[in-house]
Amino acid sequence: MNQSAFRIIVIGFGSLAIAMGIGRFAFTPLLPMMQADGLVGISGGGVLASVHFVGYLAGAAGAAYVPIRPKRLLRASLILIALCTLATGLTDNFVVWSVLRFLCGVFSAFTLVLVSNYYVKYLAAIGRAPGQGWVFSGVGAGIAIAGLGTLAFMAGGIPSASSWVIFGGISLAAALLISFRLGEEFEDERSRGSNETRQRSPVDWRTVAAYAAAGIGYIIPATYLPVMARDIVSSPFLFGLAWPVFGLAAFFSTLLAAGLQARFSNRQIWAVSQLVMAVGLLLPVLIPDLASIMIAGICVGGTFMIITMMGMKEAHRLAHPDDVIRHIGVLTVAFAGGQMVGPVFASAIHTATGSFSPSLVLTSLLLIATAAALVVRSAGPDKIRA
C-alpha cells in the first residue's frame, strides 16, 4: 500500500472513530454510569439522546452548505467534538449537557459527510477502493473502544464525570494529530465555482427510503434490546459486554463488505445487509431468550455500517462529482430522521400493546420492502467506481 493511501485510511479511520465512536456513541455505555452516580434519570437520558439526534439531523442537513473550506471544517469538527466530550465531565448542569450533546451531533454529522465524500472519492480515484472498508471500520473501532473503556472505568471505580474527561482528552489528542495530516484529498472548493453553477443530479428516492428504513431498523434494537435483555438476565457484566460486541461486529463488517465488492454491487450488498438486519429484529420475537437477543445485536451491529458505507458509495456512483456531498447529506438526513422516529414509534406500540414485538415485526417488513426496491432496477450510470 502506498504512503498516500495509508495516510488517507488512517485519517478517515481515526476521524470516524472520534466522531462516531466517541462523539455519537460513547453516551450509550456511559449513561448507566451517569444514572448510577445520580446525575441523570431515565427520562433525562432520553432527552439528552433526543437532543443529540436533533443536532445530528441539523448537521446532516447543513453540511453541504457551510461556508467554510472542507479541510478547515473537518479539523474544527474533530477538535470541537473532543472539547464537547471533555466538557461534559466538567459540569452537572443539564442545560449545558443538552447544548454539548446537540453540538456533538452537529459536528459528528459534519465529519461523517466530509469523510464519506472526500475520503471515499480519493481512495477510489487512486485505485484503493478496498481501503474504504478500513475507513468505515473506524466507527466500530470507536464504539468498541468506548465500550471497553467504560468497562475498565467501572472496574476501576472511576466515576462517569472523570470518564467523560478521559474520553475527551484522548479524543482531543487524536484530533490534533489528525488535523496536522490533512492534505491533498481536499479540493480547493473556491476554484470549483459557486453552488448555483454546479451540476445537480436527481436524488434516487429509493435509496433514501432504504437508508431511512435502516435508521429505524438500527435504532429500535439499539435502544430497546437492553431493556428486553434485562427482563431475562440481570448481570451488569453481560450488559457491559454488549456494547463492545456491537462495536466489534461493526468493525469487522465493513472489512467483509469491502472484500465482497469485487463480486457484488453496492446495492446487492446493501440489500442483503438489510435482510440480515430484518432477521435480527425478528429473532427476539420468534425466540424470546438471551441468545436470540445477543444474535440480534450482532445482526444489527454487523450491518448498519455496511449499509452506511454502501449508501455513501451509491451517492458517489449516482451523483455528479460536484453534487455528491448534497446527496450524502440527503441520505444522512434520512438516516437521522429514521433514528428519531424509531424509538417514538416503538414506545407508542409498546404502550398500546405491552410488547415490542409488533414494532419489530413492522420494522422488519419495512426493511425487507425497501431492500427489494433497491435491487429491482439499477439506477444511473457508473461514475468513478466508488
Image (spheres, rainbow, N blue to C red):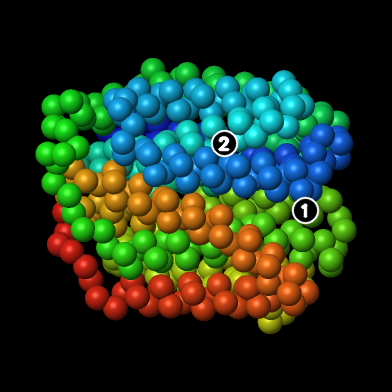
Labels 1, 2: front one: 2
Give the residue type at disc 2: Phe
- Tell me if residue 135 can be seen: no
Mark 1 residue element: helix
Q: Residues within 10 Å of mark 1 (few under 14, many from 20)?
A: some
Q: Which mark is residue 171?
A: none
* Horizontal side of residue 238 vs 174, given as left or right: right
141 shown above or below 334 = above
* Horizontal side of residue 145 vs 305, given as left or right: right
Residue in the foreground of this view, choosing between 214 and 256: 214
| Percent position of residue 52, x then y | 58, 41
| Percent position of residue 112, x then y | 42, 41
Give the residue type at disc 1: Phe
111 shown above or below 83 = below
> CA–CA distance between discs 1 and 2?
26 Å
Mark 2 residue element: helix
Residue in the foreground of this view, choosing between 62 and 2: 62
Q: Which residue is mark 2?
A: 102
Which residue of the protein is positioned furthest toward the bottom in this rendering? 286
Residue in the foreground of this view, choosing between 346 and 244: 346
For image coordinates 54% across by 19% down, the residue present is 173
* Horizontal side of residue 53 vs 177, given as left or right: right
Q: Which residue is mark 1?
A: 239
308 shown above or below 189 = below
